[in-house]
């Protein structure tokens, strides 16, 4: 049993290292592309976001694996995904909303205050929210064997 634990966490760590190195490569490409064209490449931003969300998913993967082994019906922790997941998704999409030329989206999603915060405090919070989003999504699913009114089934 102990060897399985070592192997499992080694695999998790290797996957996270691969994703972090991939993210750094994408960030380097994004910076080089920006220096050459003076435009933000949404393709590289999308890849970077998926990598960050992927790291969050890996961090919560153990929870999902333990839930898969249980008997019962799948449920969603709706308060968690609503209160933690939606705001983290919102801030995860900051770049896309900010660099969108769609005035409707910018007004609906209050892009100007976010961009002001970006200019003032930096962009590190976006990465953190992307990690949180991945983690919240994967840990919001669980199996429940009894009857409960406050959980939501998935079929």
Image (cartoon, rainbow, N blue to C red):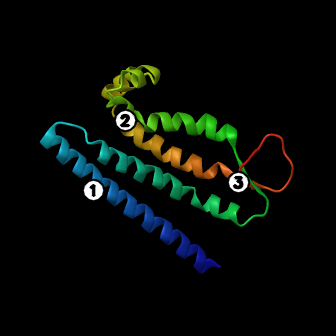
Image coordinates for residue 109, horizontal then vertical, percent: 46, 24
Number of the label disc, if any, that sits on residue 68? none
Residue depicted at 46% across the width and 54% down the height: 54
**Which comes sooner in the sequence, label 1 or label 2?**
1
Image coordinates for residue 50, horizontal then vertical, percent: 42, 50
Give the quarter of the figure containing the N terminus. bottom right
Neighbour tally class for label 2: few under 14, some 14-19, many 20 plus, Cα within 10 Å:
some
- On the image, numbered disc 3 is attached to which residue? 142
Disc 1 versus disc 2: nearer the observer: 2
Q: Do tag 1 and tag 2 residues touch (Cβ < 8 Å)?
A: no
From the viewer's perspective, tell me whether residue 56 is left or right of residue 5. Answer: left
Q: Do tag 3 and tag 1 residues touch (Cβ < 8 Å)?
A: no
Whether residue 25 is situated above or below residue 44 in the rendered picture: below
From the viewer's perspective, tell me whether residue 20 is left or right of residue 151. Answer: left
Image coordinates for residue 70, horizontal then vertical, percent: 75, 64
**Element at label 3:** strand
Whether residue 21 is situated above or below residue 9 in the rendered picture: above
Q: CA distance from mark 3 to mark 1?
A: 35 Å
- On the image, numbered disc 1 is attached to which residue? 25
Comparing 95 with 102, the one in front is: 102
Q: Which of the 4 image quarters holds residue 82?
A: top right
From the viewer's perspective, tell me whether residue 64 is left or right of residue 22. Answer: right
Image coordinates for residue 6, horizontal then vertical, percent: 55, 74
- On the image, numbered disc 2 is attached to which residue? 96
Q: Do tag 3 and tag 2 residues touch (Cβ < 8 Å)?
A: no
Residue depicted at 44% across the width and 65% down the height: 15
Neighbour tally class for label 3: few under 14, some 14-19, many 20 plus, Cα within 10 Å:
many
Whether residue 121 is situated above or below residue 72 in the rendered picture: above
């Amino acid at each position: 049993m102990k060897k399985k634990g070592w192997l499992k966490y080694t695999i998790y760590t290797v996957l996270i290292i691969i994703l972090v190195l991939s993210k750094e490569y994408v960030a380097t490409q994004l910076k080089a592309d920006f220096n050459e064209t003076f435009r933000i490449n949404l393709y590289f931003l999308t890849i970077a976001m998926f990598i960050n969300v992927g790291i969050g998913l890996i961090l919560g993967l153990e929870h999902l694996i333990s839930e898969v082994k249980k008997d019962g019906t799948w449920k969603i922790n709706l308060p968690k995904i609503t209160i933690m997941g939606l705001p983290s998704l919102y801030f995860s999409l900051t770049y896309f909303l900010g660099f969108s030329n769609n005035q409707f989206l910018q007004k609906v999603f209050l892009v100007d205050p976010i961009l002001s915060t970006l200019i003032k405090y930096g962009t590190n919070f976006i990465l953190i929210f992307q990690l949180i989003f991945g983690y919240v999504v994967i840990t919001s699913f669980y199996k429940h064997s009894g009857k409960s009114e406050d959980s939501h089934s998935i079929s």
